Image (spheres, coloured by chain):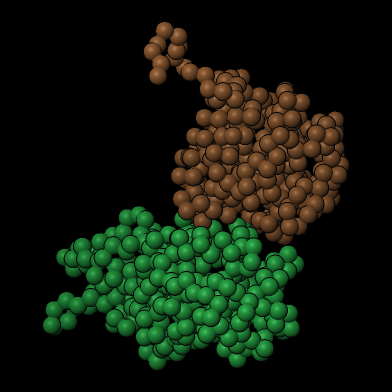
Chain colours: A green, B brown
Amino acid sequence: MGPFIISTRFGVQMMIDVTIKGAGVLGLSIATEISVRGGKVTIIDPNGAPGPHGCSWWAGGMLAPFCEGESAEEPVVRLGQDAIAWWEKNGADITYNGSMVIALGRDIKELARFGRRTSNFENIDADKITELEPDLEGRYRKALYFPSEAHLAPRQALDALVSQLKHNNIEIQTSGEADAHSTIIDCRGLAAQDKLTDLRGVKGEMLILHCPDLNLKRPIRLLHPRIPLYIVPRGDGIYMLGATMIEAGERSRITARSMLEMLTAAYALHPSFGEAEILEIGVDARPAFNDNLPRIRYEGNTIYANGLYRHGYLLAPSVAQQVANYLFDGTRPEFSDGDMPNTKNEVHHDHCA
Amino acid sequence: MSKLFYDTELKNPLMLGTAQYPSPSILADAFKMSGAGVATVSLRRESGADRAGQEFWQLIKDLNVPVLPNTAGCYTVKEAVTTAHMAREVFGTPWIKLEIIGHTDTLQPDVYGLVEGARILSEEGFQVFPYTTEDMVVAERLLEVGCEVLMPWGAPIGSGLGLNNEHGLRMLRAHFPDVPLVVDAGIGLPSQAAHAMELGYDAILLNTAVAKAGDPPLMAKAFADAICAGKAAYDADPMEPRDMAEPSTPVIGKAFL
């Protein structure tokens, strides 16, 4: 492992050369981060491009670090706050409308609980709800509003990264091996279970609906003790409705129960969803470690970056920066949980040899 | 002396559920901090076509406490029996918490289905822990068909309301002095769990109150401590309450007024 050393008449320069396995949200983010810093990047993904085979395709795309704080560990809230700027800089269309959290009548106490565990929100009343979401007029008396949050459309965001990389002459290759001097970065998500034995899958099921009767402007989370649901507007009356969280690595097969629960919750949020057309059904499993935080791990000449759980778009920028900082500056990644060879020492050692 | 649950002595009368935690690490910490004696686990939602929940089940096995699989979310005897078969295969235990829901909103047990399911499973060699109400007649029927443990609810599942019918729970205790009794469901606070133990109950089964707390491991420990205190209080044979004051030091011979 280690940077490729080029000797020139000007002295010794180091060339960061990486081969990234996996073109999901994390692989592409790391590729982006390394290429903008001048590294040489090769991406290998047998599927050739992001698509329905990977769970990045099915994500909600909420950039909602404060809402996630309800159940996520502290680093998700802290590091997730930088995600919006990163995605903006890298070509994603960001909608800056905040997010809203509501609860149905008998679950209204859940709002207080959610508020106690999160920050950077306003308690809003029926008038303010109507002002923000006219379609919800008269339906809810109270809500939480997180004004600094945002959302993006995952498939557009992935496209933007792919285009930008192409512009820099980096194409996704469908096969090939890493050169001997290239550092392998394994971003295969759940497929890396063959190497990362403590990686598990958390199944998620989601739906994409067309509901032109509604014009919701921001992600809405519906609190419910059993089925916390969110709806993310994609524009043109398209909504992403998600997502179940089931402790299983199964990557296909939506159950009738899950579909029923999600659609019932959407219908309860607004009856217009009863008339919605179901455009897509998505099922996949999120890669996760036991604390649901990512890991950057160095093992057997490979850097493994994995375990983004339900925070792919929220944490990929931070994980990508951590990997790049490690390669370029030798900074130990916050998400590493084992030995990381000191890149600077290795460079020195290689040079002396 | 503690009663045996089908020949097993619990090292701790807290039976802790494994659903709804923020992460498996936090779940494991809750067990570590509380020393809970039994882990209950739901198979239904985690089971895929290819039994894809294995990673999570392995994690439960790694907790190193007896596992009580349950049939949560089953509405019919047939579903519950099928789930019990799967549980036995996955966890290699004859224990099964039999839960057959009769009502969607209250998640109240269907006691008719429960008795029937308990009969079938007991005949098949299962050791059944039935989630029931405090109804005395149902309790008798469950014992008749082979149950050796009873698990009446405190209040509806997930409600956190505590002991809705203390009188009914007292009657069960008085009527079945030798049967291990567990308050299952509805417990929201450690004080409620302590109360149930003070009534002479043998264990407390709960999940939501710990999993949905802001700090689940700390709450699990609070429950374990309260349950331990309640059990000690019952074992210590508490005083009888009185209507009038009774001074703890003699008053005769002392000046008064």
Relative to A294, B231 lies left or right = right
- For the N terminus of chain B, give its image quadrant: top right
Going 55% across and 44% down the picture, which residue do you hit?
Answer: B189
* Residue appearing at x 74%, y 31% in the figure: B172
Near-viewer residue (A209 or A185) = A209
Which is nearer the eye, A34 or B121?
B121
* Residue A282 locus on image (x, y percent): 64, 74
On the image, the x and y values in percent for residue A329 come to 24, 70
Q: Left or right: where does residue B66 sit relative to residue A334?
A: right
In the picture shown, does residue A159 fall above or below B132? below
Extreme residue in the top direction: B253
- Residue A183 is at least partly visible in this image: no
Q: Residue at x 55, y 25 (%)?
A: B233
Pick the residue in front: A353 or A310: A310
Seen in the image, is A310 located left or right of residue B207?
left
- Viewer-side residue, A54 vs A47: A54
In this rendering, would A169 be left or right of A173?
Answer: left
Q: Quadrant of residue B244?
A: top right
With respect to residue A217, does A203 lie above or below?
A: above
What percent of the width, then of the height, locates residue B138? 83, 37
